[in-house]
Image (cartoon, grey):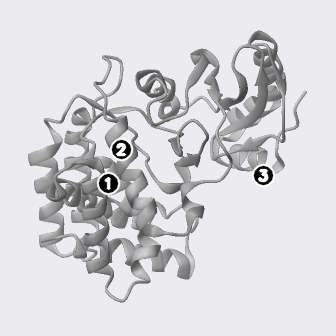
Amino acid sequence: MIGIPGEFEQSTIAREGERGAAWVALLPSLVDELLQRWNCVPDGDVLHGGVGVIVPVHSVEAGPAVLKVSFPHPGNVHEPDAFAAWGGRGAVRLHARDDDRFAMLLERAQPSTLAECGDPDEMVRVAGMLSRRLAVPAPEGLPRQSVRARHWESRLLTDAAEFEAALPARVVDAALATVRELGFVQPELVIHGDLHPRNVLRAEREPWLAVDPKGYAGDPAWDGGTLMKSMGLVFIEADDPGKEVHRALDLFADAAELEPERVRRWAQLQAVEAAYWARRHGFRRARGGPELDRLTALAGHLAEALTV
């Protein structure tokens, strides 16, 4: 049976409590069962992300692949649906799935990510190109982003009232306008939902392939906002962060063949949400202290820079 990485075991138990501990205890036998069912043998060290383990394997049918098993969580439900809709177009191929066990057998890509390329412009262009390729007609089963719009609106109003001094009124008003004007009616296209450089891997079949989608139906311009939020630390180091983030959004929009203004508006909304989220919950990389203060200020700065 496989060994579970200690860091993953500890973080899962810390986050999920007794339920997480019970799942981690069963995980080696679960992986062994899936390896036998899908005719695979382990072929490398066990890796992990935030919510799942990735076991490099050799499959009798598919060749080099990875077995991914995620902690059962609503946010992981539609990942295989997105892969199925793409059929290998701009993303790793889905070879097999077991939805009850939150498990998938996926095409193996290389371990290096787009974040390691060292060129922010290249990160933005590649992400934009992938966003365009991933924007295929959405199947019926995917959750619609438009259904979330009422929640976005309510949460923004609540946060603005509770943290009244956090952001200027014009910044919050612009985010609310985006929700009301773009949120309730969106395209019926598949979007990644968490498109950032660490979720793009080098590959052989194509230069880059996407992994770890949330799997939503909605506006592809949303993914531009996700990307900008993930690259905030890059922009804040520029001589003119506001100018740099606008230039990057234009690069993304051009590569994704999207309206730049639409991408900017979704990015502004997500920056506002991040500024409030930081005050309410902190971030995974910083729950308090000077680093959280810095990231909170960064989110607010980006939100203001993106408000026109």
* Amino acid carrying mark 2 in the image: Ser
Label 1: few (<14), some (14–19) or many (≥20) C-alpha neighbours in 10 Å: many
- Say which quarter of the image contains residue 142: top left
Going from N to C along the chain, the mark reached first, 2 or 3, is 3
12 and 88: which one is in front?
88
The residue identified by callout 3 is 7
Q: Where is residue 299 in the image (x, y as percent from the top left)?
A: 36, 71
**Sequence order check: which comes first, mark 1 or mark 3?**
3
Which element type, helix, strand or loop, lies under badge 2?
A: helix
Find disc 2 in the rendering and name its residue. Answer: 131
Q: Which residue is drawn at 45% across and 37% down?
A: 90
Residue indicated by mark 1: 224
The amino acid on which the numbered mark 1 sits, given as a three-letter code, is Gly
Query: Crowding near pointer 2: few (<14 within 10 Å), some, many (20+)?
Result: many
Task: Residue at 64% x, 23% y: name it.
Answer: 103
Image coords of residue 69 (percent x, y)? 67, 29
Q: Residue at x 29, y 62 (%)?
A: 251
